[in-house]
Image (cartoon, rainbow, N blue to C red):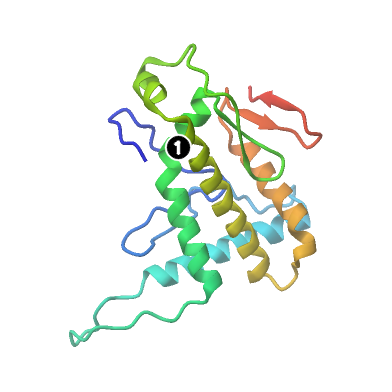
């Protein structure tokens, strides 16, 4: 990830990050997750499980390195699924700043399945604050970052299924739609979003 003093500090609206301290420290306090009556029952279940996932991540992060006697404590054993989720969180946090700029430049859009779609890396009408970033960002690195973010998002969505006994793999398409809706709601004006019918627009 590239660092720049003008870098926009923001959080990915899918996982709504979850910045890491040590192994991982996270919170969903910034998520626009209003589990209220106007949301569907499925949305409420998905978002409730998502908050439970936050607690799982916090539990991992809260393990102290030494006990009160100064003895080293071994961290609790983690399943492969937990390890994958932690890695996904780290990946999303690591690329969060670049992703926000990609959105501002119109290089990516949020599709209707909870993933990113890459658009041409246009260099016209780039804001001055991002001109160096845009000029120097390699095409292959851009593609690799989008791929990594989408893999991490998929891991997190599947983790929601694993943590809720009411969900199965058959529910994955609907869960993707829930996260896509959340992405659209959290998109900023000028960012590209895909509607449920597949059409693309720029958020007003």
Residue nearest the observer in this picture, 34 or 65: 65
122 up-or-down from 15: above or below: above
Question: Compared with residue 122, is residue 66 higher up or lower down, i.e. above or below?
Answer: below
The reply to whether residue 10 is visible in this rendering is no
Provide residue 18's location: percent of width, then percent of height.
44, 54
49 sits to left or right of 102: right
Left/right placement of residue 96 relative to residue 4 reads right
Left or right relative to 67: residue 100: right
Residue at 50% over, 23% down? 105
Q: Position of residue 86 (x, y in %)?
A: 47, 63
Q: Nearer the viewer, residue 165 or 82?
A: 82
Q: Quadrant of residue 50?
A: bottom right
Kindly identify the residue that appears in the image at 50 percent across and 42 percent down. Answer: 144
| Residue assigned mark 1 | 141
Residue drawn 66% across the image and 31% down it: 193
| Residue 192 in the image: above or below residue 149 | above
Viewport quadrant of the N terminus: top left
């Amino acid at each position: 990830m590239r660092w720049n003093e003008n870098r926009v500090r923001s959080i990915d609206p899918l996982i709504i990050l979850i910045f890491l301290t040590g192994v991982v420290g996270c919170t969903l306090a910034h998520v626009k997750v209003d589990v209220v009556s106007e949301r569907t029952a499925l949305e409420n279940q998905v978002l409730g499980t998502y908050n439970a996932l936050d607690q799982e991540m916090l539990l991992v992060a809260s393990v102290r390195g030494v006990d009160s006697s100064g003895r080293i404590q071994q961290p609790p054993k983690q399943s492969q699924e937990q390890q994958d989720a932690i890695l996904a969180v780290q990946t999303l946090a690591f690329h969060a700043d670049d992703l926000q700029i990609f959105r501002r430049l119109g290089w990516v859009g949020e599709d209707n399945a909870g993933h990113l779609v890459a658009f041409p890396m246009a260099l016209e009408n780039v804001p001055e604050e991002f001109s160096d970033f845009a000029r120097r960002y390699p095409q292959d690195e851009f593609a690799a970052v989008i791929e990594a973010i989408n893999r991490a998002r998929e891991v997190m969505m599947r983790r929601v299924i694993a943590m809720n006994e009411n969900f199965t793999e058959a529910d994955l398409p609907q869960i993707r739609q829930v996260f896509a809706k959340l992405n659209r709601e959290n998109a900023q004006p000028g960012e590209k979003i895909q509607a449920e019918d597949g059409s693309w627009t720029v958020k007003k």
